[in-house]
Image: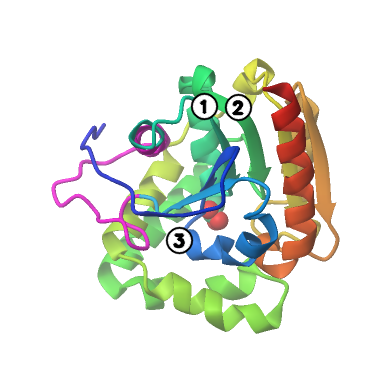
Amino acid sequence: MSNHKIQLDYEEYGSGLPVVFVHGFPLDRTIWSPLVPLLKDHARLILPDLRGFGKTAMPEDAEPYSMRTLADDLLALADRLGLEKVVLVGHSMGGYISLAFAHAYPQRLAGLGLLSTQAAADTPEKRQGRMKTADAVRRKGVARALEGMAEKLTTNPDLVEPIDALINRQNPAAVIAALKAMAERRDSTENLANISVPAVVITGTQDAIIPLERSQELNQLLVWSWLVEVPGGGHMSMMEYPEQVADALHRFFNTVESNR
Ligand code: MLT
């Protein structure tokens, strides 16, 4: 696996408890923008773009990489910022990466927020589908290969266009590499019982990408967690219902603070 060192581009707001927000696929840090005004007075919000996405460069000679590589990129960012421990809030693929981080670096984790994500690995059919999509991205580009994806991501018709634009501006090489990394990711279910920090699990009840049951399972298997269901929310509840999500995260930050 690639251990090519890269520096994640990031934005930062506020002060206090350091919280790293990890975006999902095939998106970038701008998904978190609606939460920033609601949370910046309650914590130090650190918003990176994952390798190849948003404003972070894709290493030219990158080998295939894994969720662990992406977790290592987050660790390098924490080191660069001099942070001994961070709270991670991961959305979807960002949740897979956060779970890989929790497994590899438990001593660097202060709390775990899991939004619209799961611990399960891909089924063989899903894996095959991702490989086909990766091939389509290579042949046709992101916009054509991922046409129609934005509609599936959100329950809010007004968000389809902006999310579509956000998807279309991502680098094809990063999209392909992330698809392969997700296809090959390991099942994290057994590791959940080893996560001893506070965790909040948040999901839209109408998430068409990762069903509500996956979040209920996470909540059952994590040792110290609670579940927040956002009624009517799709896969993008941080954009659809920012007040509800911010409120859940604010309460979670308070729990993490009182555990430090
Ligand atoms: C994401 O939102 O990160 C992806 O849709 C997750 C996935 O495809 O498994």
- Which residue is depicted at the point 39% across and 31% down? 82
- Residue corresponding to mark 1: 85
User: Disc 3 residue type?
Assistant: Asp
- Residue corresponding to mark 2: 110
Residue 216 drawn at (x, y percent): 79, 39
Label 3 element class:
loop
Query: In this image, 196 relative to 9: left or right?
Result: right
The answer to whether any part of residue 146 appears in the image is no
- Which residue is depicted at the point 47% across and 21% down? 105
Say whether marks 3 and 2 touch (CB < 8 Å).
no
User: Disc 1 residue type?
Assistant: Lys
- Which residue is depicted at the point 45% across and 70% down? 167
Membership of 72 in magenta stretch: yes
- Residue corresponding to mark 3: 28
Q: Quadrant of residue 3?
A: top left
Q: Quadrant of residue 231?
A: bottom right
Q: CA distance from mark 1 to mark 3?
A: 23 Å
Residue 58 drawn at (x, y percent): 24, 54
